[in-house]
């Protein structure tokens, strides 16, 4: 009800209703509008005359369903653009062709190798497997401390993403309080 009041009281509606031509001819305007609705009603009744009530209900449900699908399609086209889905579909089909699939695999392998080499440059004494002989606890502790110092440098320079929970950092303690 509030929505209806806001529409009726909208300045544009008030300006039209208060316009002198509309005020003078309100009776004839309302009669003309009712006449148009009457014609529309008669035409719809004539079109639906051969159908019974159940068929009219089914037609209405089907029409609402079809218009809903059309609305979704038009909304999608409006938001995505007409060419985006076409390009996406072409790219997906192209990726499945043997020559493109091979090229993509080659590029991925090249990028992985480049990333691995770059990461290894930043790390000294990388460990990829457990040693044959165990280390004494002091050596392990020294190695972990060295790695921690090295990695905190990367973290402070912004080269490592993610969450860091580090008790001895005053900045983080301030943020946590």
Image (cartoon, helix red, strand yellow):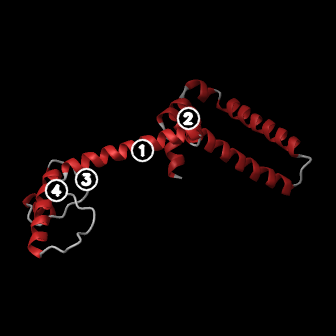
Q: What residue is shown at x 36% (from left), y 43% (from top)?
A: 111
- Dot 1: element: helix
x and y percent of residue 137 in the render?
12, 75
- Dot 4: element: helix
Give residue 99's quadrant in the image.
top right
Q: Residue at label 4? A: 151
Q: How many marks?
A: 4
Whole-number angstrom distance, CA of label 2 to CA of label 3: 33 Å
Q: What residue is shown at x 55% (from left), y 30% (from top)?
A: 16
142 w.r.t. 71: above or below: below
Mark number displayed over residue 161? 3
**Within-10-Å neighbours for mark 2: few <14, some 14–19, many 20+:** few
* Furthest residue in direction top, as rendered: 21
- Dot 2: element: helix
* Furthest residue in direction front, as rendered: 132
Q: In front: mark 2 or mark 1?
A: 1
**Within-10-Å neighbours for mark 1: few <14, some 14–19, many 20+:** few
Q: What residue is shown at x 15% (from left), y 47% (from top)?
A: 157
Question: Does 23 sit left or right of 29 as displayed?
Answer: left
Whole-number angstrom distance, CA of label 2 to CA of label 1: 22 Å
x and y percent of residue 49 in the render?
90, 46
Whole-number angstrom distance, CA of label 4 to CA of label 2: 42 Å
Q: Residue at label 1? A: 108
Q: What residue is shown at x 25% (from left), y 69% (from top)?
A: 130
Question: Does 169 sit left or right of 59 as displayed?
Answer: left
Q: In front: mark 4 or mark 2?
A: 4
- Dot 3: element: loop
């Amino acid at each position: 009800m509030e929505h209806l009041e806001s529409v009726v009281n909208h300045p544009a509606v008030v300006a039209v209703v208060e316009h002198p031509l509309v005020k003078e001819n309100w009776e004839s305007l309302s009669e003309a509008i009712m006449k148009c609705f009457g014609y529309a009603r008669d035409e719809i009744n004539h079109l639906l005359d051969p159908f019974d009530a159940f068929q009219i209900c089914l037609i209405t449900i089907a029409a609402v369903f079809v218009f809903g699908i059309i609305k979704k399609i038009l909304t999608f086209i409006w938001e995505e653009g007409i060419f985006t889905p076409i390009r996406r579909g072409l790219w997906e089909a192209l990726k499945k062709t043997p020559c493109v699939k091979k090229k993509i695999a080659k590029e991925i392998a090249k990028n992985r190798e480049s990333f691995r080499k770059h990461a290894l440059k930043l790390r000294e004494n990388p460990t990829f497997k457990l040693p044959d002989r165990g280390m004494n606890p002091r050596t392990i502790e020294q190695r972990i401390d060295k790695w921690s110092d090295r990695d905190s440098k990367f973290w402070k320079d912004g080269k490592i993403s993610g969450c860091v929970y580090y008790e001895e950092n005053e900045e983080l303690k301030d943020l946590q309080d």
